[in-house]
Image (cartoon, coloured by chain):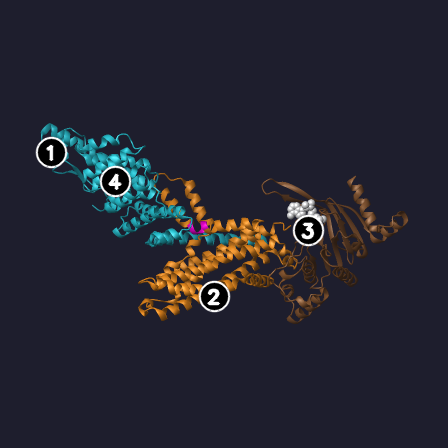
């Protein structure tokens, strides 16, 4: 059974208001992610990574193709019951504190007051924001906002995580934190779909990696096969196996 | 559906945090002072002038919500992608719209309540200062009814803001559309009356007649919610009018919310 | 299933809202406010301040409300009370305060106030103001001429205004000879016809046009009758006692009907009046 599944997705954005010029973002993308799998999408800027994740969140509707989570078509009621989503540029209400955001999350889920308190505390501790829990978000730095959004994402201990460049804007400690969280959720049996352009991070935690280029999913590899191939073929010491593979793939696409 | 209330609360809180309450409180203090002092300049109808000033301030205060807060809170949500934070929580888009509407209604309500209290204080102060014969005919109920109707009118405008924000992508456009709605809403009845008048004259063009009718039904008749004059002169309210206004407001709001949800569900939030 | 339910609810809301909208419209129609706009009551400097940078559009809007107010009455053939006329005058003054170059309030004033409300002096004040501001427009002076000639019986002053009107470029060329011709018989009736013809050129409001045309028709008929009376007098050296005599002597085939529903009759001085006094007679009330 696959948790994430998309089939021949096409998507183009309308640019321009009157002229119906459209910008192609995705062309014929299909892949599946099984339960307990960590699937990483890598690609250059503008490759269409975020668009895929937004389609899974039903924020954006594909022009063609089917998308489902847990074998339920997205956008149907309850399809993202237990999903944690971290947007690419997380934005919270600037005048509210992180605590109020977390309270909102718990209330929507209908948790009891006691449970609510416990969840908020754990989430804050995980991202190390307990001290600024009552400060309005607009006083946060980029990295702190990212952490706050991360806390909000994992608040309800979701079984599915969709993370859009979770490491962007974070210091080395924060980056390690994200890796730890992903590792922890992975160990707990969660399914994780995420995208990034920091290849070393992706390499360390992913089971499978999809490489996107100009709206197409050009190749999907497992981490294991990557290592094997690299050992047998490459002699370049300065690149990691994924970097080597990625650059090769993208180069062949361009030429 | 049980997520409507949390959304309303978070909208309400975020709205209040924008120093709205302080602003409104300062404004209401000024209002009390102004109303008490200015009305002394008039010879006879002190009460009428006071009620005029106070009710106008209440309407203006209410209008802050659709024109400034609502657009900020709605279009801002979409422009800054804060909406992802909400919608990622298994919240349907219809709950989002309804929750936002409720939150804005709460904001409008609190502003109007504060200004209403200021009004009562101002009138009380005036009774201490000015001769009693000015206040013989004073009754509270016209004041309350007219304020209630002003509140309903602002809610109608709020619901159109929701519709505009759900069909356009830019907050500028939403502001412009809201302003147009407001202006049309306050002049539509007079204009339609004028157009109908022409038609009963020499040549009747069914086209123009139909347009005039359609305009009256499509745009909210905001002027109808303005009962300030009746309150100022303590004229009796026609209960039929109040009933019709109430029903009209509620049904118009439902239509706007229906349409807002309809369009919002079908739109991309890139 | 859900779609149908939603559609049903939506249609219901639409029906209810339309019902209430038309209900409110009717209600407002029935107990019309007795005021055109409260804005009229505000003193001029304050009114100008309150309109910020929008005095123009405010005056347009007030004009529209005034026209609506008057038009509704004209349509229903209802007379306005002196108080209402006073209010209309006040509103027109306020409009001209806000936008002095706006010609409409002056024209509306001239077309209604002296005729229906007897407010000649007030109209003249407005017109003097207009003449001072609209220096390139012959109409204010033209109106002033007419008011002095027709209503105030002051031919000297009237001639003065007519001269002024004729001197303004764009004035109809016959103005300069008009004064001379007016000393002839039936001057007032002829002046009225000239005036109304000028007015009808200005007007595109159907309600007003209707009332102006009716008045022109009546005046033309009176003029026609007076002309025939003069002819009768030339022939028999006396005025006829009854209009019927014109028919008997074969000067006219029949006495034309008064468009206002009254009856024409002849005065001692050979002038023709009507029992309607150029005010529309209500049907049934005889
Ligand atoms: N709202 C939008 N309007 C128009 N084009 C867009 C929009 N969002 C994304 N695109 C285009 O779609 C393509 C994919 O974007 P995205 O999925 O954000 O790429 P990335 O892989 O960097 O996350 C890009 O070429 C981008 O220009
Ligand atoms: Mg991206």
Residue position for label 2: B114
Is residue C241 shown in magenta? Answer: no
Q: Nearer the viewer, residue B121 or A118?
A: B121
- Element assignment for label 4: helix
Which element type, helix, strand or loop, lies under badge 3?
A: helix
Question: In terms of secondary structure, where does tag 2 sit?
Answer: helix
Measured in 3D between alpha carbons, the distance from the residue under mark 3 to the one under mark 4, in whole angstroms, is: 76 Å
Q: CA distance from mark 4 to mark 1?
A: 33 Å
Palette colour of chain C: cyan
Residue at left 82%, top 50%?
A242
Name the one closer to the observer, C279 or C246: C279
Establish if C173 lies above or below B237: above
- Give the residue at mark 1: C239
Q: Position of residue B158 (x, y in %)?
A: 51, 56
Give residue C221's position: percent from left, percent from top.
22, 34
Discs 3 and 1 carry the same chain letter: no
Chain of the residue that carries numbered disc 4 in the rendered image: C
Q: Decide if residue B94 is on the left or right side of residue A85.
A: left
Of circles 1 and 2, the one toward us is 2
Residue that label 4 marks: C144
> What chain does badge 1 belong to?
C
Tag 3 residue: A55
């Amino acid at each position: 059974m696959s948790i994430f599944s998309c089939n021949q997705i096409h998507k183009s954005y309308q640019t321009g208001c009157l002229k119906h010029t459209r910008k192609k973002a995705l062309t014929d993308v299909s892949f599946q992610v099984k339960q307990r799998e960590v699937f990483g999408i890598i690609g250059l800027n503008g490759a269409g990574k975020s668009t895929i994740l937004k389609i899974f969140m039903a924020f954006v509707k594909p022009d063609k193709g089917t998308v489902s989570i847990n074998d339920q078509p997205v956008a149907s009621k309850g399809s993202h019951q237990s999903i944690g989503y971290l947007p690419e540029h997380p934005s919270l209400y600037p005048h509210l504190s992180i605590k109020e955001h977390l309270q909102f999350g718990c209330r929507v889920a209908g948790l009891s007051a006691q449970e609510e308190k416990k969840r908020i505390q754990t989430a804050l501790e995980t991202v190390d924001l307990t001290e600024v829990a009552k400060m309005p978000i607009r006083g946060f730095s980029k990295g702190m906002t990212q952490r706050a959004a991360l806390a909000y994402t994992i608040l309800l201990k979701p079984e599915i995580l969709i993370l859009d460049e979770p490491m962007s804007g974070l210091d080395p400690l924060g980056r390690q934190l994200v890796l730890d969280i992903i590792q922890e959720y992975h160990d707990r049996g969660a399914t994780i779909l995420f995208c990034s352009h920091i290849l070393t991070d992706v390499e360390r935690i992913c089971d499978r990696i999809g490489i996107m280029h100009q709206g197409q999913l050009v190749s999907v590899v497992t981490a294991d096969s990557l290592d094997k191939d690299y050992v047998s073929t490459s002699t370049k010491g300065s690149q990691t196996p994924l970097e080597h593979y990625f650059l090769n793939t993208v180069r062949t696409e361009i030429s | 559906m049980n997520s409507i209330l949390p959304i309303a609360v978070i909208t309400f809180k975020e709205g209040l945090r924008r120093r709205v309450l302080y602003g409104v409180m300062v404004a209401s203090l000024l209002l009390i002072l102004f109303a008490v002092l200015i009305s002394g300049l008039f010879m006879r109808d002190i009460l009428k002038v006071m009620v005029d000033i106070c009710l106008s301030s209440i309407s203006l205060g209410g209008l802050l919500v659709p024109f400034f807060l609502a657009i900020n809170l709605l279009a801002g949500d979409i422009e800054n992608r804060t909406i992802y934070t909400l919608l990622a929580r298994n919240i349907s888009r219809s709950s989002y719209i309804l929750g936002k509407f409720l939150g804005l209604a709460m904001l409008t309500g609190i502003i109007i309540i504060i200004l209403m209290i200021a009004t009562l204080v101002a009138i009380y102060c005036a009774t201490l200062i000015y001769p009693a014969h000015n206040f013989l005919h004073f009754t509270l109920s016209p004041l309350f009814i007219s304020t209630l109707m002003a509140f309903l009118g602002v809610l109608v405008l709020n619901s159109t803001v929701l519709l505009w924000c759900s069909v356009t992508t830019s907050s500028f456009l939403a502001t412009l559309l809201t302003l147009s709605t407001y202006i049309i809403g306050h002049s539509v009845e007079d204009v339609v009356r004028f157009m109908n008048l022409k038609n009963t004259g020499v040549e009747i063009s069914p086209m123009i007649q139909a347009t005039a009718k359609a305009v009256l039904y499509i745009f909210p008749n905001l002027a109808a919610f303005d009962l300030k004059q009746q309150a100022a002169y303590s004229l009796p309210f026609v209960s039929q009018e109040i009933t019709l206004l109430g029903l009209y407001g509620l049904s118009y709001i439902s239509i706007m919310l229906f349409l807002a949800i309809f369009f919002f569900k079908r739109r991309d939030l890139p | 299933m859900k779609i149908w339910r939603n559609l049903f609810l939506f249609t219901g809301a639409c029906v209810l809202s339309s019902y209430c909208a038309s209900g409110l419209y009717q209600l407002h129609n029935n107990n019309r406010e007795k005021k055109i706009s409260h804005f009229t009551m505000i003193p001029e400097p304050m009114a100008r301040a309150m309109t910020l940078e929008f005095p123009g559009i405010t005056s347009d809007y007030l004009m529209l409300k005034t026209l609506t107010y008057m038009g509704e009455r004209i349509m229903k053939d209802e007379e306005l009370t002196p108080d209402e006329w006073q209010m209309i005058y006040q509103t027109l003054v306020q409009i001209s305060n806000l936008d002095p170059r706006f010609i409409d309030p002056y024209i509306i004033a001239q077309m209604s106030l002296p005729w229906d409300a007897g407010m000649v002096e007030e109209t003249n004040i407005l017109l003097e103001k207009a003449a001072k501001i609209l220096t390139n427009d012959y109409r204010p002076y033209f109106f002033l001429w007419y008011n002095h000639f027709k209503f105030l019986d002051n031919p000297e002053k009237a001639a003065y205004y007519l001269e002024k009107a004729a001197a303004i470029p764009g004035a109809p060329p016959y103005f300069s000879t008009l004064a001379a011709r007016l000393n002839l018989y039936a001057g007032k009736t002829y002046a009225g016809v000239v005036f109304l013809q000028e007015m009808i050129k200005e007007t595109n409001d159907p309600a007003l046009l209707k009332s102006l045309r009716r008045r022109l028709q009546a005046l033309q008929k009176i003029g026609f009758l007076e002309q025939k009376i003069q002819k009768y007098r030339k022939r028999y050296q006396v005025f006829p006692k009854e209009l019927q005599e014109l028919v008997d002597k074969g000067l006219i085939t029949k006495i034309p009907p008064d468009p206002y529903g009254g009856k024409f009759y002849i005065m001692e001085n050979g002038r023709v009046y009507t029992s309607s006094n150029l005010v529309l007679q209500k049907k049934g009330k005889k």
